[in-house]
Amino acid sequence: MAFALTPEREKKVDEILSRYPTTRAALLPLLWLCQEQNGWISPEVIDFVAARLSLSTAQVKGVVTFYTMLFDKPVGENVVWVCRTLACDLRGGKAIQEHLEHRLGCHAGETSKDGKFTLLKAECLAACGQAPMVQINDLYYENLDVEKLDRILDEIAASTKGKEAAR
Protein backbone atom coordinates (compact mmCIF):
# COMPACT_ATOMS: atom_id res chain seq x y z
CA MET A 1 0.00 0.00 0.00
CA ALA A 2 1.39 3.39 -0.95
CA PHE A 3 2.37 5.80 1.80
CA ALA A 4 0.93 9.31 1.90
CA LEU A 5 1.27 12.11 4.42
CA THR A 6 -1.75 13.65 6.07
CA PRO A 7 -2.85 17.01 4.62
CA GLU A 8 -1.45 18.78 7.69
CA ARG A 9 1.95 17.15 7.21
CA GLU A 10 1.88 17.92 3.48
CA LYS A 11 1.65 21.60 4.44
CA LYS A 12 4.72 21.08 6.62
CA VAL A 13 6.54 19.55 3.64
CA ASP A 14 5.86 22.71 1.64
CA GLU A 15 7.27 24.77 4.53
CA ILE A 16 10.33 22.52 4.78
CA LEU A 17 11.01 22.67 1.04
CA SER A 18 10.79 26.47 1.07
CA ARG A 19 13.68 26.62 3.59
CA TYR A 20 16.24 24.79 1.48
CA PRO A 21 17.98 25.72 -1.77
CA THR A 22 17.78 22.14 -3.06
CA THR A 23 15.25 19.39 -2.45
CA ARG A 24 17.97 16.96 -1.34
CA ALA A 25 18.76 19.25 1.60
CA ALA A 26 15.20 18.63 2.87
CA LEU A 27 15.75 14.86 3.05
CA LEU A 28 16.31 14.53 6.81
CA PRO A 29 13.42 16.79 7.86
CA LEU A 30 11.08 15.00 5.46
CA LEU A 31 12.17 11.57 6.70
CA TRP A 32 11.65 12.73 10.29
CA LEU A 33 8.15 13.96 9.42
CA CYS A 34 7.28 10.66 7.74
CA GLN A 35 8.63 8.65 10.67
CA GLU A 36 6.59 10.79 13.05
CA GLN A 37 3.44 9.74 11.19
CA ASN A 38 4.32 6.13 10.31
CA GLY A 39 6.41 5.18 13.35
CA TRP A 40 9.29 3.96 11.17
CA ILE A 41 10.75 4.34 7.69
CA SER A 42 9.12 1.52 5.74
CA PRO A 43 9.96 0.68 2.11
CA GLU A 44 6.78 2.55 1.15
CA VAL A 45 8.01 5.65 2.99
CA ILE A 46 11.36 5.38 1.18
CA ASP A 47 9.51 5.24 -2.15
CA PHE A 48 7.35 8.22 -1.19
CA VAL A 49 10.30 10.38 -0.08
CA ALA A 50 12.38 9.44 -3.12
CA ALA A 51 9.54 10.41 -5.47
CA ARG A 52 8.71 13.59 -3.54
CA LEU A 53 12.33 14.81 -3.62
CA SER A 54 13.29 13.38 -7.04
CA LEU A 55 15.96 11.14 -5.52
CA SER A 56 16.70 7.47 -6.00
CA THR A 57 15.45 5.03 -3.40
CA ALA A 58 19.11 4.06 -2.84
CA GLN A 59 19.95 7.64 -1.87
CA VAL A 60 17.08 7.77 0.60
CA LYS A 61 17.80 4.31 2.04
CA GLY A 62 21.46 5.26 2.46
CA VAL A 63 20.45 8.15 4.69
CA VAL A 64 17.91 6.05 6.61
CA THR A 65 20.46 3.34 7.39
CA PHE A 66 23.15 5.86 8.37
CA TYR A 67 21.26 7.77 11.08
CA THR A 68 20.31 5.98 14.30
CA MET A 69 17.40 8.40 14.84
CA LEU A 70 15.67 6.91 11.80
CA PHE A 71 14.19 3.45 12.23
CA ASP A 72 14.20 1.06 9.28
CA LYS A 73 12.06 -1.48 11.11
CA PRO A 74 9.03 -1.08 13.37
CA VAL A 75 9.68 0.08 16.92
CA GLY A 76 7.57 0.17 20.05
CA GLU A 77 5.33 3.02 21.04
CA ASN A 78 8.21 4.37 23.15
CA VAL A 79 11.89 4.14 22.29
CA VAL A 80 14.28 3.87 25.23
CA TRP A 81 17.92 4.70 24.56
CA VAL A 82 20.35 3.63 27.29
CA CYS A 83 23.56 5.61 27.39
CA ARG A 84 26.50 3.19 27.55
CA THR A 85 29.51 5.51 27.69
CA LEU A 86 32.12 5.29 30.42
CA ALA A 87 30.60 8.09 32.53
CA CYS A 88 27.22 6.36 32.62
CA ASP A 89 28.81 2.96 33.13
CA LEU A 90 30.82 4.17 36.11
CA ARG A 91 27.65 5.51 37.72
CA GLY A 92 25.44 2.46 37.08
CA GLY A 93 24.57 2.52 33.38
CA LYS A 94 25.07 -1.22 33.00
CA ALA A 95 22.75 -1.92 35.93
CA ILE A 96 20.16 0.40 34.36
CA GLN A 97 20.37 -1.50 31.06
CA GLU A 98 20.15 -4.88 32.79
CA HIS A 99 17.15 -3.71 34.80
CA LEU A 100 15.44 -2.47 31.63
CA GLU A 101 16.09 -5.79 29.89
CA HIS A 102 14.60 -7.68 32.83
CA ARG A 103 11.62 -5.36 33.27
CA LEU A 104 10.77 -5.05 29.58
CA GLY A 105 11.49 -8.70 28.80
CA CYS A 106 13.72 -7.89 25.86
CA HIS A 107 17.35 -7.19 25.08
CA ALA A 108 18.81 -4.07 23.53
CA GLY A 109 17.69 -3.92 19.91
CA GLU A 110 14.35 -5.59 20.66
CA THR A 111 10.79 -4.54 21.46
CA SER A 112 8.78 -5.61 24.50
CA LYS A 113 6.04 -8.17 23.85
CA ASP A 114 3.31 -5.58 24.56
CA GLY A 115 4.79 -3.24 21.94
CA LYS A 116 5.11 -0.36 24.41
CA PHE A 117 8.91 -0.15 24.48
CA THR A 118 11.86 -0.67 22.17
CA LEU A 119 15.18 -0.81 24.01
CA LEU A 120 18.31 0.50 22.28
CA LYS A 121 21.87 1.29 23.32
CA ALA A 122 23.42 4.67 22.57
CA GLU A 123 27.14 5.30 22.48
CA CYS A 124 26.68 8.73 24.02
CA LEU A 125 23.69 10.88 24.89
CA ALA A 126 25.80 13.87 26.01
CA ALA A 127 24.71 14.04 29.63
CA CYS A 128 27.86 12.74 31.31
CA GLY A 129 27.50 15.06 34.30
CA GLN A 130 24.05 13.63 35.03
CA ALA A 131 24.86 9.95 34.58
CA PRO A 132 23.38 7.42 34.47
CA MET A 133 20.68 8.46 32.08
CA VAL A 134 18.29 7.27 29.41
CA GLN A 135 16.43 9.00 26.64
CA ILE A 136 12.81 7.96 26.20
CA ASN A 137 11.38 9.30 22.96
CA ASP A 138 12.55 12.93 23.00
CA LEU A 139 13.05 13.34 26.76
CA TYR A 140 16.16 12.84 28.90
CA TYR A 141 15.91 11.21 32.33
CA GLU A 142 19.08 11.77 34.32
CA ASN A 143 20.69 10.80 37.64
CA LEU A 144 18.76 7.56 37.54
CA ASP A 145 18.49 4.69 39.92
CA VAL A 146 16.27 1.65 39.44
CA GLU A 147 13.44 3.02 41.58
CA LYS A 148 13.33 6.36 39.75
CA LEU A 149 13.44 4.56 36.40
CA ASP A 150 10.58 2.26 37.41
CA ARG A 151 8.40 5.25 38.34
CA ILE A 152 9.11 6.85 34.95
CA LEU A 153 8.34 3.61 33.08
CA ASP A 154 5.12 3.09 35.06
CA GLU A 155 3.93 6.59 34.13
CA ILE A 156 4.78 6.11 30.47
CA ALA A 157 3.26 2.62 30.26
CA ALA A 158 0.01 3.86 31.84
CA SER A 159 -0.18 6.87 29.58
CA THR A 160 -2.06 6.90 26.30
CA LYS A 161 0.42 9.50 25.15
CA GLY A 162 3.73 8.75 23.53
CA LYS A 163 4.45 8.24 19.89
CA GLU A 164 0.91 7.07 19.08
CA ALA A 165 -0.58 10.36 20.34
CA ALA A 166 1.73 12.33 18.05
CA ARG A 167 0.52 10.54 14.92
Image (tube, rainbow, N blue to C red):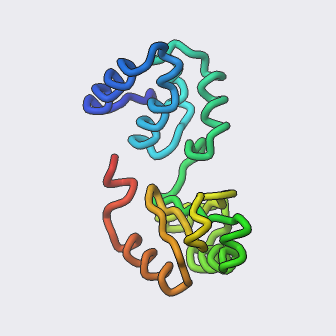
On the image, the x and y values in percent for residue 11 come to 28, 26
* 19 relative to 109 in the view: left or right: left
User: Depth check: 144 or 107 in front?
Assistant: 144
User: Residue 48, can we see it?
Assistant: no
**Whether residue 76 can be seen here:** yes
* Residue 104 percent location from the top left of the image: 56, 74
Above or below: residue 35 compared with residue 11 = below
Extreme residue toward the front, this view? 129
Against 34, is 153 above or below? below
User: Where is 82 relative to 44, above or below?
Assistant: below
* Residue at image location 66% in from the left, 37% down from the top: 65
Residue plotted at (60% across, 72% down): 131
Which residue is pictured at 41% across the width and 36% down the height?
33
Q: Nearer the viewer, residue 153 or 3?
A: 153
Which quadrant holds residue 118? bottom right
Residue 130, percent from left and from top:
55, 71
Residue 143 appears at what percent x and percent y? 53, 77
Count of residue discs = 0
* Residue 108, image quadrant: bottom right
Q: Residue at x 56, y 46 (%)?
A: 69
